[in-house]
Image (spheres, rainbow, N blue to C red):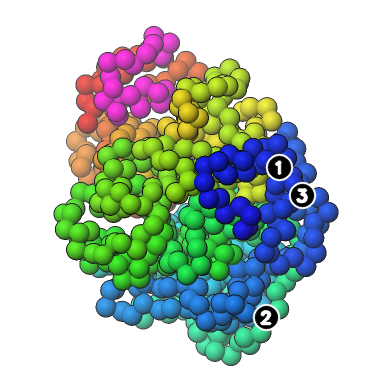
Amino acid sequence: MSNYHIKNLEEYFQVYRKSVRDPKTFWDEIGQEHFIWHRKWDRVLSADFKSASVKWYEGAKLNITENCIDRHLRTKGNQTAIIFEPNDPNENAVHISYNELHERVCKFANVLKSQGIQKGDRVCIYLPMIPELAVAILACARIGAIHSVVFAGFSSTALSTRINDSECKIVITADGSYRGAKTIDLKSIVDDALEDCPSVKSVLVVQRINSKISMKVNRDQWLQPLLDIASPDCPPEIMDAEDPLFILYTSGSTGKPKGMVHTTAGYMVYTAFTFKNAFQYRDKDIYWCTADIGWITGHSYIVYGPLANGATTVLFEGVPSYPDFGRFWQIVDKHKVNQFYTAPTAIRALAKQNLAFAEKCDLSSLKVLGSVGEPINEEAWHWYNDNIGRNNSPIIDTWWQTETGGIMISPIPYVTPTKPTYATLPMPGVQPALMDDNGKELVGNQVEGRLCIKFPWPGMARTIWGNHDRYRETYFSAYENMYFTGDGALRDEVGYYRITGRVDDVIIVSGHNLGTAPIEDAVNEHPAVAESAIVGFPHDIKGSALYGFVSLKETGMGRDHENLKKEINQIITEHVGPIAKLDKIQFTSALPKTRSGKIMRRILRKIACNDVANLGDTSTLLNPEVVEEIKSNSL
Ligand code: WTA
């Protein structure tokens, strides 16, 4: 990748033009550099967006853990690969060198083998942010098992849905997790989930909080005793370029979550390339991404991208508010972090606190500040720039998705002049297009439309687990020969992109993608509820929050509405997770519907956003009178 460690804007445009003119040669050259291949590819790319079939580096053979670990042992064996910063600042941080990581991954991989796990098997990982999470992921990749990490904030129902969808054979979890001042009983969530998961034969349990938990005979085992007797020698399983590496679930606008499948070679090359360039990572830098590994940001930019570059990556167990709101800045100071990557929701929450929290810390090590997950508003951008970057560290507003595998649009720090709220320019190899409502591409600058990508890139997901039709339909059917992102964007007068937000029924709350359909399904489970519609409304910390319009089976007279609201949120917590709780619940006599029976969410969205002056044409509604009622009772 050294050829493409981009140094100035002119070089960026040169590289970019080359990547568009001849993408195959471009990615061929990047693939040649640095990586260990057991066999070179026969074809760089074969792709057909019509059938949603994309293959990169076909014919190549490799193992990603050799590239993320073994490759560095000779030169960086004693360098720290992972710095583990525990939830409690009084517990010592742990530095895991590349040598140690190698040993831990090999041992863990051998434990998986001893449990009968083989290449192609699915392994569910439901762990807090502790080193075992990264090690478990890499152990799967070592033996060619497909990991499916489920964010440990998801409920038991959400967990079992994901386990069943990909028929995982084994679950790796912990006795519990620390989260600020709280502890969370992860194992009992797993126990509940597994009531309903016939494919799971065994459970490995990491001891983290030393709580008393129940262990099911013939199913559950503590991990440590198995590691103690495991061999530290585990030769990597040699994989085909297009063998699946992992499944990661993301919300869709409708129905059940989509198990996005990422494959081995393209994902590796893309995360390695984008990590190096988007963060301008240099040897010996300390890099910290605050995301949870349960999300794509953690997969690509805590684990795979940094380790593929031989970087030192910080893994933080806790939350920004514990023991106080200075924690992030204390960690930057303590470990002398050079690149810091977080989400707008965290920035907004921290910007509300006393500035002294940041001022007390030495933040001079910082060179690059990243933002990801949702649009960053102008106020948060300036606060981040002025008070954390101290006008000295460029902000990279990185736009990408679970589906894209890696960063797609982002400034290159010290190369691309930044502009608040703009993700600016595409990474080399990425060809964005803006489309109008009639399916025509908007050419030129100063246009706004739906964001698509017109050419494949190596990091893109290849399918949805078990449902290729849904993959094709969701991403490749809206516009011919284009990948459709589900986001809206504009291009300004110099060609910079600004992402304006989702154009579908996905709502991003505190950086988490939430589909409205599964939350509505949960609400509708309440015996008193007839139906519900959930929309987003602006929230000054979460970015968006959820507003539920709920109609009851009986008019609800005599019911305690406050209690009902609590019960509804409780059901959501059980079915989806606490992150999906509704901030506002309005009971209505009915929901506005079209004559064909579809709920008119457009109107509800406007009411939730207090934008009632212009509701558009309501005359086509089946029940226009209900709009007045909802408007006058809105919260
Ligand atoms: C949104 C997270 C504006 C967008 C990596 C996208 C952003 C969705 C940005 C994907 C950004 C992500 N500016 N919006 N810099 N980054 N998004 O799959 O709507 O969790 O489609 O991947 O987050 O979320 P996901």
Name the residue carrying label 1: 23
Secondary structure under tag 3 reads: strand
The structure residue drawn at horizontal position 26% and vertical position 25%, both measured from the top left corner, is 610
The structure residue drawn at horizontal position 61% and vertical position 19%, both measured from the top left corner, is 440
The answer to the question of whether label 3 and label 1 lie on touching residues, with beta carbons closer than 8 A, is no
Name the residue carrying label 3: 44
Q: Is mark 1 within 8 Å of ligand 1?
A: no
Front residue (pair 408, 128) = 408
Question: Which of the marked residues, 3 or 1, is nearer the chain's N terminus?
Answer: 1
Where is 513 relative to 598, above or below?
A: below
* Image depth: mark 3 or mark 1 in front: 1
Where is 511 relative to 448, above or below?
A: below
| Predominant SS of the magenta segment | loop
Residue 482 falls within the magenta-colored stretch: no
* Image depth: mark 2 or mark 1 in front: 1
Amino acid bearing label 1: Pro
Question: Which of the marked residues, 3 or 2, is nearer the chain's N terminus?
Answer: 3
CA distance for labels 3 and 1: 9 Å
Q: Is residue 235 visible?
A: yes
The structure residue drawn at horizontal position 61% and vertical position 28%, both measured from the top left corner, is 478
Front residue (pair 334, 236) = 334
Q: Is residue 285 left or right of residue 244?
A: left
Count residues near mark 1 (Cα–Cα under 10 Å), then give few for <14, some for 14-19, many for 20+.
many
Q: For residue 234, which numbered disc appears in the image?
A: 2
